[in-house]
Image (cartoon, helix red, strand yellow):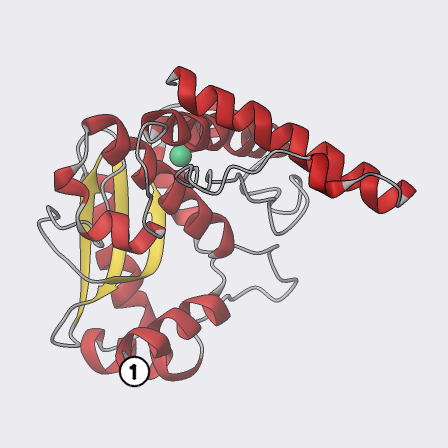
């Protein structure tokens, strides 16, 4: 961080504190506070979102310990490292804009922006398992999957095979492509289909993390079992919402 920026940050913090005191006490002379309007704005740091459910909510398929580690350590590291990698930028675009031109940034931005986006999406695409045995696609997405794959089982089989066969760390996706087709694909590391350098581009509808850190504590090397169990957790309502938005845009 440059001295100037550090100075600015320090001054901003002081201003913020002064603002709070002023609000509380109502007797600080604001004219005495320094002004820094000519300073460039600091990039808005990215923030680790809370899990949308308790860490144990996905049990027995994904255990609490894995979730605490995956969210609290791995995802947090992507957010922290993304903010660090962007600290000298004068302006930071919104996440999707950044991903769309990620090839113009450093590898650190690519890996950590992907890591932050992918995990945020992943959490939202899961929910506590239902008591009913079958967790099925909903709405317009259910109709489309049936039309393209014949039935749910056939879709699940193809997606699972893609996830299983992906070599090394990465993600498996269902996407809506620019021409409104739906496609199953996988991407290496923390890449995703919104990136300008993705082999298959599109808007994500489903996302499955196949990094070992996502399942190793509970499943060790049994990726197939993790994938099979993950279907009990898919938040199909959210997936249908993403699908509908992607088809409309
Ligand atoms: Mn992960």
Assess disc 1: are there few (<14), some (14-19) or many (≥20) residues with their C-alpha within 10 Å of its C-alpha: few
Residue drawn at x 26%, y 30% is 169
- Report if residue 104 is visible in the image: yes
In the shown orientation, is residue 180 left or right of residue 64? Answer: left
For residue 2, above or below residue 13: above
- Report if residue 161 is visible in the image: no
How many discs mark residues in the rendered view? 1
In the shown orientation, is residue 90 left or right of residue 137? Answer: left
- Image x and y of residue 115, in percent: 35, 37
- Image x and y of residue 62, in percent: 54, 39
Q: Quadrant of ligand 1?
A: top left
For residue 146, above or below residue 128: below
Q: Which quarter of the rendering shows the N terminus?
A: top left
Q: Which quarter of the rendering shows the C terminus?
A: bottom left
Residue assigned mark 1: 248
Residue drawn at x 13%, y 39% is 104
For residue 29, above or below residue 232: above
């Amino acid at each position: 961080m440059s001295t100037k920026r550090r100075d600015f940050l320090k001054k901003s913090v002081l201003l913020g504190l002064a603002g709070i005191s002023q609000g509380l006490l109502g007797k600080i002379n604001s004219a005495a506070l320094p002004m820094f309007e000519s300073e460039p704005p600091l990039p808005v740091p990215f923030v680790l979102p809370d899990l949308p459910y308790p860490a144990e909510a996905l049990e027995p398929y994904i255990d609490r310990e894995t979730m605490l580690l995956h969210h609290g350590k791995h995802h947090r590291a992507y957010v922290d490292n993304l903010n660090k990698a962007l600290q000298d930028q004068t302006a930071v675009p919104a996440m999707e804009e950044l991903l769309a031109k990620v090839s113009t940034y450093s590898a650190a931005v690519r890996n950590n922006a992907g890591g932050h986006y992918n995990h945020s999406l992943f959490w939202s695409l899961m929910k506590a398992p239902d008591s009913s045995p079958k967790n099925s696609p909903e709405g317009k997405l259910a109709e489309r999957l049936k039309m393209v794959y014949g039935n749910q089982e056939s879709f699940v089989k193809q997606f699972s095979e893609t996830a299983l066969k992906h070599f090394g760390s990465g993600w498996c996706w269902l996407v809506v492509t620019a021409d409104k087709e739906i496609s199953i694909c996988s991407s290496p590391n923390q890449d995703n289909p919104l990136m300008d350098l993705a082999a298959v581009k599109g808007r994500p509808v489903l996302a499955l993390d196949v990094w070992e850190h996502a399942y190793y504590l509970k499943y060790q090397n049994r990726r197939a079992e993790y994938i099979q169990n993950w279907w009990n957790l898919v938040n199909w309502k959210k997936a249908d919402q993403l699908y509908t938005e992607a088809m409309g845009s």
